[in-house]
Image: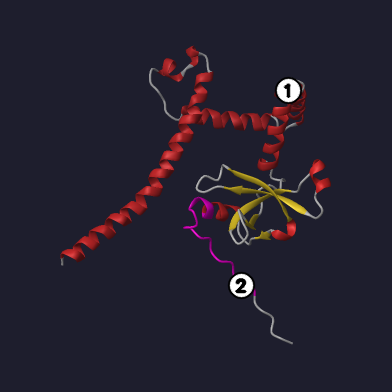
Amino acid sequence: MTTKKTTTLKTVFLTGLLVLVPLAITLWVLSLVIGTMDQTLLLLPESWQPERLFGVKLPGLGAVLTIAFIFVVGVLTHNFIGQKLVEWWNAIVRRIPLVGPLYSSIQQVSDTLLSSNGNAFRKALLIEYPRKGSWTIAFLTGIPGGDVVNHLHEDHVSVYVPTTPNPTSGFFLILPKREVVELDMTVDAALKYIVSMGVVAPASPARRPVDPPL
């Protein structure tokens, strides 16, 4: 009887833990993001600080203002005049020593990753890594370019291999196209699979019907 009660209490405790842990982690991440965005208020003059104006600290105000600022910049640069101003700004920054090359590289990466027309991180792949017989999930980032192509003797692809459970760090690899398996899996599902260390497996795609023998 005691064993049964102990098992029931353990089950109830684990059930509550499974409900609260994802919620706690989600709230922690949101708090971290909002807290970071709130730091943008420090860019304002001291006399304009909300704490000085209203007499109280308003958590989340910096996040709201940051999001609003991003939307305003997007609206202003969406028209012809805004695009010309952006081109003028880019031309000036690119001529600054040291800053120009760094700015151009970051701009190319962000355009590739965030643009709706880009192909980066649009496909989940299965590759053998870090050795033969050991498989992992990677993301297609493009095809090799520049002088790299002159040293490759067959079609290759550029892939990003994220680490677990933090997919923001990882490895950049150039692999033969024939060694890459394209998965019938969305990028979101692949990321969940990676972050969960394989615990949250994506749903299996429906099997294609096999044609009857002739």
Spot occupied by residue 174 in the image (x, y as percentages of width and height): 71, 49
Say whether disc 2 or disc 1 marks the residue closer to the N-terminus: 1
Say which of 144 and 37 sits in front. Answer: 144
Amino acid type assigned to the residue bearing label 1 in the image: Val
Name, please, the residue furthest toward the front.
Answer: 131
Q: In this image, 108 relative to 45: left or right?
A: right
Say which of 210 and 128 sits in front. Answer: 128
Residue drawn at x 50%, y 47% as measured from the top left: 165
Instruction: Check residue 211 in the rendering and tell me which mark sits there, or answer none.
Output: none
Residue drawn at x 77%, y 30% as measured from the top left: 80
Q: In this image, 154 relative to 195: left or right?
A: right
On-image quarter of the C terminus: bottom right
Say which of 173 and 142 sits in front. Answer: 173
According to the picture, the residue beneath numbered tag 1 turns out to be 93
Q: Say what secondary structure mark 1 lies in.
A: helix
Q: In this image, 49 relative to 168: left or right?
A: left
On-image quarter of the N terminus: bottom left
According to the picture, the residue beneath numbered tag 2 turns out to be 207
Residue drawn at x 51%, y 60% as measured from the top left: 201
Residue 42 higher or lower than 111, as above or below = above
Spot occupied by residue 114 in the image (x, y as percentages of width and height): 66, 41
